[in-house]
Image: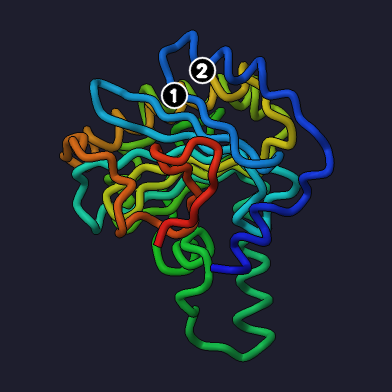
Amino acid sequence: MLESFKRFFSGRSVERDLTEVSEWARRRGHDFKRARGDAGFVIDGVLDGKPWRIEWGPPHRGYIEGHELRLRMKLDLASDVQMLLLSRPLMDALERQTFEEFTDNVQTQIGTKTPEEMRWLVMFPKVNLGNLKVLRDHFGAAASDPVAGLAWIEGPLANMLERAANGFLRDAPPFVLMTLRGRVYLRMQLVAPDSSVISDALAVFETAVAQALRAGGGVADPSTGWGPDASTAWQSLRPDSPGAVHKKR
């Protein structure tokens, strides 16, 4: 936990103007909270009456540099609905890293401390994106059930991702969409906060949520999803402590 706080509070020497982002959030009726110092911010919103969360701050993944944009929403998906989509350069890099770490060191088992993104690339079959000609050049995917994974991606989400590849993802930053423990997650490298990028990422995320419900047969969870079982990869602000950063246990 201490190391997580150190990472979250590091790199605060440069003052950032978050006015534009906070105004964007409030115009849309979202709740904006700035982290103490210059660690980042949290935005809480709703989709079809159910909550989602955006965070921007120091990265929680080694493959992301600078700052990281993170989105999540809790859904009533089966725990075995495990689907992953990554930007193609990131997928290639993680596969190389996994191979080097677990073959050069003669390790035969991937530890639980290894990020799911890396473990799933080894554990799960790839999703065949061969018929999605534009998408396959920019992204790769894996899933516990490749049929469900393809059903998640094809159609509206594929269309959104194709537009993103020519828009806010045109420089191919590290980008991940995944379903894990009944939640949908998006994380990407975003060095400086930009409301237009956040807005576009949110549109992709909301489409991923809708498609996950269709592919996984679930419904949006009426609870906040920020309870004690929430992923420890996420930082949050407690509603009763504006401006204070807390680590979820």
In the picture, the disc for residue 31 is: 1
Cα–Cα span, label 2 and label 1: 7 Å
Mark sitting on residue 203: none
**Residue drawn where x is 29% and y is 45% of the image:** 225
10 Å crowding of disc 2: few (<14), some (14-19), many (20+): many
Identify which residue, 93 or 52, lies in the foreground.
Answer: 52
Q: Quadrant of the C terminus?
A: bottom left
Going by the image, does 213 lie left or right of 82?
left
Residue 19, how many percent across, how many down?
66, 18
Is residue 34 found left or right of 152 in the rendered image? right
Residue 8 percent coordinates (x, y): 64, 53
Identity, as a three-letter code, of the amino acid under mark 1: Asp
- The image quarter in which residue 184 lies: top left
Q: In the image, is residue 143 above or below residue 49?
A: below
Residue ID at (52%, 31%):
33
In front of the other: 145 or 5: 5
Q: Position of residue 60 (x, y in %)?
A: 60, 55
Looking at marks 2 and 1 on the same chain, the residue that comes earlier in the sequence is marked by 2
Is 122 located above or below residue 133 in the figure?
A: below
Give 194 or 93, whichever is nearer the viewer: 194
Instruction: State the residue position of label 2.
Output: 25
Residue 71 in the figure: left or right of residue 208: right
Location of residue 35 by image quarter: top right
Question: In the displayed structure, would residue 95 be above or below residue 190?
Answer: below
Mark 1 and mark 2 in contact (Cβ < 8 Å)? yes
